[in-house]
Amino acid sequence: MLLNGLQRLEYRGYDSAGLVVSNGEEKFKLMRSVGKVSNLTDKVKQHIPENTTFNMGIAHTRRATHGGITEMNTHPHYDTNQNFFLVHNGIIENYYKLRNELADKGYTFYGQTDSEIIANLLEDNRNGNFLETVQKVLKKIKWAYALLIVSKYAPGEIIGAKIWSPLTFAYNDKDECFFASDQQALAGYADKLIHLDDGDLIHLRDKSYQIISNGVPTEKEPEIVDQDVLEASKGSYKHFMIKEMYEQANIIRRIFKGRVDFKNNFLNAEAFHGMKDEKFKKIVFVGCGTSYNAWSLGTYRMENLAWLDASCEIASEYEYRNIKVTDDTLFVFISQSGETADSISVLKMIKQKGWHTFGIVNVVGSTISRLTDYGLFTRAWAEIWVASTKAFTAQITSILLLALYLGQKRWLSKAHYDKVIIELSKVPIMIEDILADSDNIRELAQEIAEYKNFFYLGRHYQLPIAREWSLKLKEITYLHSESYPTGELKHGPLALIEWSIPSVLLAPHDLMFEKNLSSIQEIKARNGKVIAITDKEVEWADHKIQIPSTIDEIYPFLTTVATQLLAYHVADILEKDIDKPRNLAKSVTVK
Ligand code: F6R
């Protein structure tokens, strides 16, 4: 069970993995190994006979923050006397001070992680009562953490606790209990879930559990979770990435369900009713990475369709800026995981000030979905692949619905609104058309895979897409690429243009088409190589990826899928580990 769970959570980190198991008696068996979970699985098979039974254990797959990728820095960690074992997500901010204090008392350390400190602190504060010892230590460490702790002094018991980092508790009808940092690990094992809040601790013993919230015993109602939502498998596809790309058309159909009535061009969602949008004059989008790029497109949508002032902010920067906010501002948080620490940090700050918040989140029950006042779930279901594809498409669909809803309440003309809705209904089919062209795009990828540097260029609605796909290419191919507003080329970057740096130009037949044609000439005049993604004839381009024709608002869906395919095929041709790109993790729960 532990190894299966780790396998499912491997997208969270895959530098090293480990586990500790016990049969409910004092003896604990610890196994750790560097690299992917499969290395740990091999080690377990080698060292633990198949019919051995254990009735409890904790396990972890690591993405290194403090300390290199070594077996010693792999979780579970333990104290000098091996009395306590723990796994930890997050960062202990006061760890240097605690480490020095412990060293002064004679404790020694085998690794460089902040997590190991907690194990020694537990030993140092041991008073014969497992729960009290843990509670005492939690008061000393400065979060963030999601922690699972076991002890030889309390065989058969596990304590889980969290501040900032996600932790879910779950159980089933067979008296089995589980903790996980993402509910996806629990598919097929448990269906009753309790999402823990900051300051919560769960003490599990004798098949019963007690929840203590900020020191006070409390009760929480479990949620029943749909197994289909949790289940994720690669099926016959070579990678999760390509599988998830092929899911996109159906995800959009799913987003429409109950929210868009195409017969009457009517939009409907609970969140829309709840948000009393009349009050808002300004929208501030907050997110990171791919979600930030989705926001950036959202800004254009809000300005053009909803006539609202809009800005998008990088979460890790926003918190430290001194921006003036008025009461008629709506903060919209977008996140696939709903657990990104940078975004949560801004969300908590905004909530403290009493401002209005809206979430566009994929993972149901995640922290951002629970903390925001209103929201839309993006219905992309589990996204496994580290670099986001279907979640991005689901985000830009949800944002478009929000912009249309707000627009029709303001000044968006009925004719314009109807036109967008009608074209929107065709998006799933148009996406399927582009996916059907995958072999041709692969041929082009074959030709460009030998290059080391790329430009991704776009204007207006296409600029966020250029940014997103420049990011994607970096993530999965490790090739260098830069994204620019096409109009910025002449202000400096043109100096770099030469045949060995191809430019991928997003040039659909939209408002910017003529301007893009001029840019192609500009690049060609400097002996540059151009790959145009377009629905028109572009005679000067060296290569072309054909997309269907539509209207300006809808082209971003099409250029997204075309650039996805291009990046995927280049990475596959270069034989990269597409589903687990180096140095990355799916959900970034540290700041
Ligand atoms: C890139 C990617 C990341 C995430 C970012 C925010 O492909 O997936 O850039 O978009 O870490 O994550 P979420 O959306 O979970 O808040």
Image: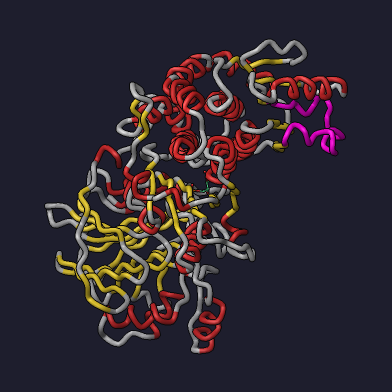
Identify the residue at image location x=34%, y=49%: 274
* Magenta stretch, residue numbers: 485-505
In the image, is 155 to the left or to the right of 482? left
**Which color mode does the image show?**
secondary structure
**What percent of the width, then of the height, locates residue 96?**
56, 77
Q: Quadrant of the C terminus?
A: bottom right
**What percent of the width, then of the height, locates residue 109?**
51, 75
Q: Is residue 487 magenta?
A: yes
Identify the residue at image location x=80%, y=34%: 489
Residue 561 in view here: no
In the image, is 255 to the left or to the right of 98? left
Closest to the observer, 104 or 166 = 166
Closest to the observer, 448 or 509 = 509
Residue 356, by quadrant, is bottom left
Residue 82, by quadrant, is bottom left
Residue 393 in view here: yes
Identify the residue at image location x=38%, y=26%: 265
